[in-house]
Image (cartoon, rainbow, N blue to C red):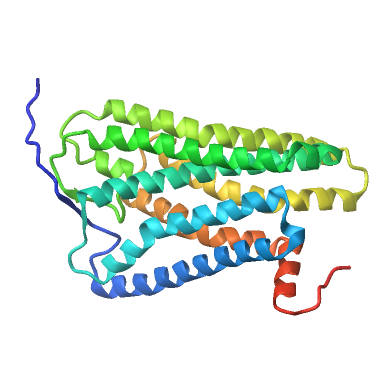
Amino acid sequence: MAKYNQTWVSEFMLLGLSNDQKSQICLFALFLAMYLVTMLGNILIIHLIRLDSRLRTPMYFFLSILSIVDICYMNSTVPQMLIHFLSSRKSIPFTSCVFQLYISLGLAGTEFFLLGAMAYDRYVAVCYPLHYTVIMHGGLCMALAAACWAAGFLNSLMETIITFRLPLCQDIINHFVCETLAVLRLACVDVSFNKVMVTFSGFVVIMLPCSLVLFSYAQIVKAILRIRSTQGRHKAFGTCASHLTVASLCFGATIFTYMWPRTTSTVELEKMIALFYTVVAPMLNPMIYSLRNKDVMSALRKAMGRPSEEK
C-alpha cells in the first residue's frame, strides 16, 4: 500500500480571492453591498407574501421558501468572506469547515429540488388551470417543500461524510469557502471514488430537478402554443418567465462547475462560478421575481401606500 504523510488538521487556511490589500478592501465593499441587497430583497419578498392575501398561492409559497433558502445560503458563506477580506490570517476551524460544507451543500440541494417543485407548480397552473387549486392544495405544497429540504440535506450529509473521512496532507484550501472539490485536492490518497460520488450526487441533485424543469416547460410550451389569442399566450408565459430565468441561472452555473468535463477548467474559474451561484444568483432572484411580476409590484405599491396601477 502506498504510504502518505497524513497531517492532523485542526484548522484550514483559505487563500480567498486576492492577496492584494487594496483589492480586498474593494471586494469587501462590493460584497457587503451585494449581501445587504440580497438580505433586503429576500426579506421584502417574504414580508410582501405574508402581508398581501393575493400572494397566498402555491407559487408564492414556494417563492417564500426560495427566499428563505437564499438568505440562509448567503449567511453560511458571505459573513466569513467579509471578515477574511479585512483579516491578514484567513483561517477557519476544522469543525466550522465541515459545518459550512454541510450547510451550504444542503441549502444548494434544497434550492435545486425547490426549483423543480416550482416548475411542477407552473406546469399544473398552465396545463390544468381548472384543477390547479385542487391539485396544488396546501398539504401537497407543504409535503413538496419538506421533501426538498430533506433530500437536499440527506445528500449533503452523505457527501460531507465521505469528503472529510479522507486523510488530508495539507491545510491550505485554494478557495474562499470550504467547497467539496477544493477539499478533495488536499487528500493524501486517490479520490476517484469521491469524484464518482460527486458526479452521482450532481446527477441526483442537479440533473433530476433540471430534467423536471425541462419536461415541465416542454409541456407548458405545448399548452401555450394551443392558446389562440396572443394576449393569452403572453399572460400564460408571463407566469413562468421569472421562474424559468432563475432556474436557467442556477442550473447553468452549477452544471458547468460539477458536471462539465474537467480538462479545461481551472481553480480560478471554479472560484468565479462559485461566486456567481453563492453571491450573485441569490441577489438576482428577488429582483427577477419582483421586477418581472405584476402581483409582487402591486403588493409593494400597496405596502408603500401608493395606489395600484392595475388596468
Query: Where does residue 113 sit, x and y in percent of width and height?
Result: 55, 39
Query: Where does residue 252 sit, x and y in percent of width and height?
Result: 53, 44
The furthest residue to the front: 139
Residue 281 visible here: no
Query: Where does residue 105 sit, x and y in percent of width and height?
Result: 40, 44
Q: In this view, does 255 lie above or below 284?
A: above
- Residue at (50% x, 42% y) in the render: 149
Q: In this view, does 46 lie above or below 62?
A: below
In the image, taking residue 29 as reference, residue 283 lies left or right, namely: right
Q: Is residue 160 above or below residue 3?
A: below
In the image, taking residue 204 as reference, residue 86 lies left or right, namely: left
Q: Quadrant of the C terminus?
A: bottom right
Q: Quadrant of the N terminus?
A: top left
- Residue at (53% x, 56% y) in the render: 68
Instruction: Depth check: give the residue in front, 123 or 58.
Output: 58
Residue 208, picture quadrant:
top right
Instruction: Depth check: give the residue in front, 159 or 183.
Output: 159
Residue 46, picture quadrant:
bottom right
- Residue at (27% x, 64% y) in the render: 18
Instruction: Depth check: give the residue in front, 38 or 272.
Output: 38
- Residue at (29% x, 25% y) in the render: 193
Q: How many labels does the image show?
A: 0
